[in-house]
Image: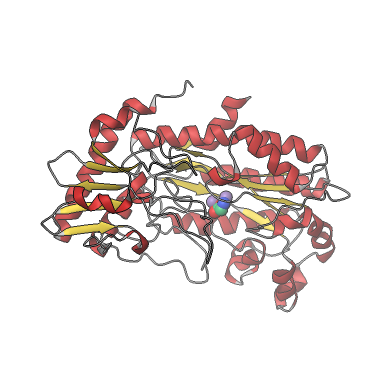
Amino acid sequence: MKPEDATSLYPAHLSTIKERANLALQKSGFDHLLVTSGVEKHEFLDDRPYPFKPNAQFKAWLPLTRHPHSWISYTPGRKPVLVYFQPDDYWHVPPSAPSGTWVDHFDIRIISDPAEATAHLPSSGKLAIVGESDAALPGFEPNNPKVLLDYLHYHRAFKTPYELAVMRQAQRRAVPGHLAARAAFQAGASEAQVHAAYLAATGHTDLDLPYNNIIGLNQNGATLHYQYKDIVAPSRNRSLLIDAGAEVDGYASDITRTWGDGDELFGALLNAVDNEQQALCGKVRAGTDYRDLHLECHLRLGGVLRTLGIVDMDPGDMLATGVTSTFFPHGLGHPIGLQVHDVAGFSDEDGGLIARPEGHPYLRMTRTLAPGMVVTIEPGLYFIPTLLSKLKEKPQAKSVDWAKVEHLLPFGGVRIEDEVHCTDGAPENLTRDAFAAAV
Ligand code: GLY
Ligand code: MN
Ligand code: MN
């Protein structure tokens, strides 16, 4: 499929953002919406800045991601004002002059000092100011009204055609990285070398990634958010679990692939998880309660454990007694978009909580799927020593083939993660489409 032109979809996207802002202001009783991009933070007692990450509510309006001290000021019925910070700086590269098709849609005011922003912000009326408290200017302290934010966050789950087009690009950007990572793994690379291959193939630096890559060789794949990259390769590369995304214009992808070394049992486990993952992706359909899909995932993974002879129990009993949670101790997935773990996975339109199923504390999405939503589907089966030792103390331990578990421990685990777009009909798997387009 030919990549779409996201820019031609942008004006309609902005109209949707404005409509949402109109309703959120009306609902919450404010006259103007102000959104700060945020500020650069510095290390304690130092002049070194942490990487800047903009307020996602700012990125929702326009594709600016490297722009601290900027503001959007929106009053219903009027062209939004963009206060654009462009310092005269020879220590750092300042943002270049505003450019792109979005420029015509804003009344742009350039400032060279953050304090100058106040001259361009409303001088009367009730202000809803969305942003971190550090971004406050005199008279403009972020108040983040709950009613307004609940509404905006809830609706962010529904992606506009522009957002979908950009998210497809973020998938296509990550895929060459995953293919390069697999090749590096097969060549015996270290975790740090796999990471370097990923960055080179995606054209990202560490700072541009939507989250820190998780690159676990062998048993390190069993640490769910493994945060290191060993510079020394193991004596034998048995398995690679790589959870790595890419970013385009502020939108994230979040993809996990696992590769093995040809070991028969681990290969069977990989295939089985992949099959169940694809079946679950096929169930991302309007009207489905994501919580039910999560519980179905437990049953399916229980089926895999039984079929492979790892646990000899009925999958329903495995779910009821927490055995599946030993091997699958995280949630099925989460909403994704401007943030990797996008907001409002648990809330209804009024900010009310949609509870997780009891005993599933790490599920990040409890909403009913509806057209326009994009969610990850990321089942996994892991061999995590600390959880296995707890299982050993339980009566269900007798149903476990511990020799098989011992065999699989040095492989860490398997996770397969795709992004899936819920439509009016069949789901669109953004990730598999991107892999298919790459070969
Ligand atoms: N990369 C973190 C996650 O999959 O949620
Ligand atoms: Mn994820
Ligand atoms: Mn992930």
Q: Nearer the viewer, residue 201 or 264?
A: 201
Q: Residue at x 26, y 50 (%)?
A: 116
Q: List x then y, in percent, for residue 90.
A: 47, 41
Q: Residue at x 63, y 54 (%)?
A: 380
Q: List x then y, in percent, for residue 306.
A: 71, 58
Which of the 4 image quadrants contains residue 401?
A: bottom right
Q: Residue at x 62, y 66 (%)?
A: 325
Identify whether 94 is placed above or below 367.
above
Identify whether 2 is placed above or below 320.
above
Q: List x then y, in percent, for residue 292.
A: 46, 57
Q: List x then y, in percent, for residue 198.
A: 66, 38
Q: Residue furthest top?
A: 2
Q: Nearer the viewer, residue 219 or 174?
A: 174
Which of the 4 image quadrants contains residue 395?
A: bottom right
Question: In the rendered view, does 236 fall on the left or right side of 438?
Answer: right
Report if residue 180 is visible in the image. yes
Q: How many marks?
A: 0
